[in-house]
Image (cartoon, rainbow, N blue to C red):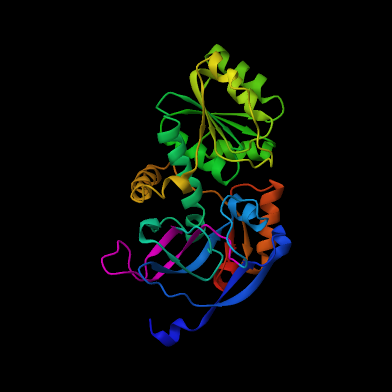
Amino acid sequence: MSGAARRSTHRAVQVVELKGPEGLRLVELPDPDPGDGVLIEVHHAGVAFPDLLMSRGEYQRKPSLPFSPGVEVAGVVREAPLGCHVRAGDPVAAFVRVGGWAELVVAAPSLVFALPRDLSLRSGAGMPMNYLTAHLALTRRGGLTAGDVLLVHGAAGGLGTALVQAGKALGARVVAVTSTPEKAELARECGADHTVPTDGWLGSVRELLGPGGVDVVADTVGGDALLDSVRCLSREGRVLVLGFASGTIPSIAANRLLLKNVDLRGVAWGSLIEDEPDYPARQWADLMEWHAAGFIRPVDGRCFALSEAGDALRELDSRRGLGKITLALRPADERNS
């Protein structure tokens, strides 16, 4: 790309005040210089809970104002460094720590992933954060194996559906906890063997499973469910803490973990890869095998235009949505949303 072209501008959404959706503004920014990174023309960007929290100044990573939210994108490579595994014109998904809600982004080559032709850019935008987190949670942190029982809280959201699908890819029996019949139907479409309603879920699970209990609980919700999640475990079972969509960070008395020799394990993909930059590529290879086998089928939720980013955050915050919420950054994509 010529120097003159790099001095042109592109649209982006920025957080200008830490007021959540009300603090967002649509702006024009100078085009970035890719340096040693991969320059991507973004078609779709994921909307994730870190975006919502960062817009309020409540996330562990606190960029200086103004900044563009967005941790995952999908689009087409415009430029890539010599010897890179992707090249100009390739469809890709990518993880960026901040700045994804922009028509042009630069991503580290190790965090850019080639998309197969049967995965749309809209679906690809929801994969890096959710599916790589689900992979880490179930394979490495949870030690899930074929025949285990996996229980997923919040099973109809972006991360929840990824956990259900990854659990089935690993051969688990999956129980999905959902708040509405519509969400239960979606969880079953993703492969869940059983669904139970949020109200009274512990009793329903005990009735379903009998004395055996659950081997791994994947909790994306937090709040009051933590104690009951520990109670439902089998001996040496594991509760995986993946997030706090309920808005409440729970606590538990440590003696609860002693009674059945159970574990409470945190899952933070974004911090782990800082020390293991080669790990995401290995994860992606597994995901592509699972996709080819029919297990990985991203669930597209509502898609908003870039100018509607505030509404997208409100939709996420409401927890009404099904599947992965995304932003469309190109006019042609907005027409197809």
In this view, the residue in front, 135 or 259, is 259
Count of numbered circles on the image: 0
Task: Name the quadrant of the C terminus.
Answer: bottom right
Q: Residue at x 64, y 62 (%)?
A: 304
Q: In this orientation, does residue 213 appear?
A: no
Which stretch appears magenta?
67-94
Q: Residue furthest bottom?
A: 4
Q: In the image, is residue 92 part of the stretch drawn in magenta?
A: yes
Q: Where in the figure is residue 258, as x and y percent of width and height?
A: 54, 16
Q: Quadrant of residue 18?
A: bottom right
Q: Residue at x 69, y 50 (%)?
A: 317
Q: Is residue 37 above or below residue 179?
A: below
Q: Is residue 125 above or below residue 230?
A: below
In this view, the residue in front, 119 or 282, is 282
Q: Residue furthest left?
A: 83
Q: Where in the figure is residue 45, as x and y percent of width and height?
A: 54, 61
Task: Name the quadrant of the N terminus.
Answer: bottom left
Q: Residue furthest top?
A: 211
Q: In the image, is residue 291 part of the stretch drawn in magenta?
A: no
Q: In this orientation, does residue 201 appear?
A: yes
In this view, the residue in front, 62 or 42, is 62
Q: Residue at x 65, y 58 (%)?
A: 55
Q: Where in the figure is residue 295, as x and y percent of width and height?
A: 43, 41
Q: Residue at x 55, y 12 (%)?
A: 211
Task: Say whether residue 119 is left or right of residue 201.
Answer: left
In this view, the residue in front, 142 or 166, is 142
Q: Where in the figure is residue 128, as x and y percent of width and height?
A: 46, 52
